Amino acid sequence: MRLLRSFIFAVWLYASMAFVGLVLWPFVLMDEKHVYTALRWWSHATIWGLRWIVGARVSFEGLEHVPKGGALIAMKHQSMLDTIVPSLILEKPTFIYKEELGSTPVMGAYLKKNQLAVDRGGHAKALKSLVRGAREAVAKGRQIVIFPEGTRQPLGAAPDYKSGIAAMYKDLNIPVTPVALNTGLIWKPKGLMRTPGHVTFKVLPPIPPGLSREDFMAELERVIETESEAMLPPDKRRSVAA
């Protein structure tokens, strides 16, 4: 039964993305702000599908810490869900995505409108381009969402924070808002299966600007990992898994 529900949800997820994307595309062509409208519509559809098809609920905590205007948000990354629902709490979410995703049907067209592409093989040149794009996005009042580990991590995996977030933190000279989560409980990094349950996105107090690179990276990892681990059942935490 769980496999069947997971399959139906996968159909719902991508069918709703295609439907929303095609319906709103004419509006996006007139004004790119409707990219955010499309993201919110798809987010609502995804949460509805999780609730009524899979039997999983999504909630938010710490909404008083959600930044307004231009901002930099660093989020734990455990599932595809992490790239969808932040649009429900952010006014102008701007995601950093792998450049190759720009060629995917429907989604790629939206990503190219006002999101930030990164060439993972570009190294220093790619980082400079990303920082420049982030600077422009913040100046336009957008909230940049970055996953410091770069890719989805399974429950129990050791932290693997990359330096890109530190370069943006130093250049932008603005607070970084960390977000902890436990979405891996219902939605694994890979595979079809989805699991009933209740997951939470927890927005944490911002880390102020001005810290050294080492102190910033240490603090970012500490707060995100501590809060994310605390939201897991005891048998899923790294200390037990190890």
Image (tube, rainbow, N blue to C red):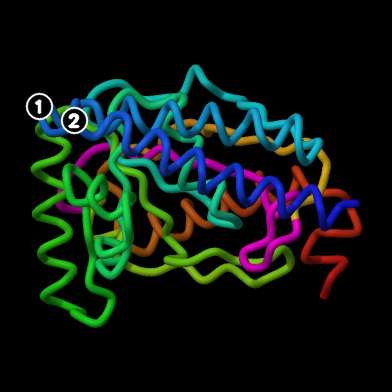
Figure check: 181 above or below 122: above
Residue 26 disc label:
2
Q: Is residue 145 magenta?
A: no
For residue 32, side relative to residue 41 (left or right): left
Q: Left or right: 43 with respect to 169?
A: right
The nearer-to-camera label among 1 and 2 is 2
Q: Is residue 64 above or below residue 9?
A: above
Query: Which mark is drawn over residue 30?
Result: 1
Q: Is residue 78 left or right of residue 184?
A: left
Is label 2 in a helix, a strand or a loop? helix
The image position of residue 24, as x and y in percent, is 28, 29
**Magenta stretch bounds:** 170-193
Residue at point 79%, 48% (across, down): 5
Numbered label attached to residue 231: none
Residue sitting nearer the eye, 36 or 239: 36
Residue 176 x/y as whole percent: 35, 41
Q: Position of residue 190 (x, y in %)?
A: 63, 68
**Residue 27 place in picture, x, y as percent:** 19, 26
Residue 67: name its quadrant. Answer: top left
Residue at figure coordinates x 82%, y 75% from the top left: 242
